[in-house]
Amino acid sequence: MTKYTIAPTGRERPFGEEEIMVSKTDLTGRLTYVNKVFARVAQYPVKSLIGAPHSIIRHPDMPRSVFKLLWDRIAAGHEIFAYVVNMAKSGDHYWVLANVTPSLGAQGKIAGYHSNRRKPEPGKIEKIKPVYDKLLAEERRFDDRKQGMESAFAMLTGMLQEKGLSYDEFILTL
């Protein structure tokens, strides 16, 4: 798979409020299925997405610490709702409210992951952006990316504890 170096354009990529983006991955985050809406908005042919890492649409302004929270939750068998900014092949961005769930195999063990995404309410994005900006600033303070992500993750969990909210409750209060 070719690794793309894409620069963000600052332009938002539109999609309809009634549209649902769907993707499925294996346990390592490699795409095993995408629907046509996902492919169209991401600006990739479906065939080129299958087998690619889901991170092919990762926007550099999306905090890695939020993805750590997401992966920790789904690997433990829990679903998660998260606001995510993604990046299309053109460098345009698009915000989604993602619902990510583990997919269970025949023996009841996690066999992969399934995600549905919708267009979020603009007001919710304006509320999450400052949180993500703080997390990104913390991540970027460190030369070591893993250390930065861990520090921002601690910041995120500390913020939730300070508010007396679980992550799910926090998302619902936005």
Image (cartoon, rainbow, N blue to C red):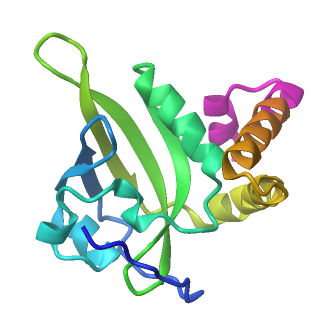
- Magenta segment's dominant SS is helix
Q: Residue at x 75, y 58 (%)?
A: 136
User: Vertically, is 127 above or below 114?
Assistant: below
- In reply to whether residue 167 is colored magenta, the answer given is yes
In the figure, is residue 78 to the left or right of 153? left
Residue closer to the observer: 100 or 164: 100
Q: Residue at x 69, y 25 (%)?
A: 166
Residue 24 in picture, x, y percent from top left: 24, 46
Residue 121 in picture, x, y percent from top left: 56, 62
Residue closer to the observer: 129 or 109: 109
- In reply to whether residue 43 is colored magenta, the answer given is no
Residue farthest top in this picture: 107
In the figure, is residue 43 to the left or right of 10? left
User: Vertically, is 93 above or below 152?
Assistant: below
Residue 127 in picture, x, y percent from top left: 74, 58
Q: Quadrant of the N terminus?
A: bottom left
Place residue 66 in its image quadrant: top right
| Range shown magenta | 160-174
Residue closer to the observer: 139 or 133: 139
User: Vertically, is 92 above or below 63?
Assistant: below
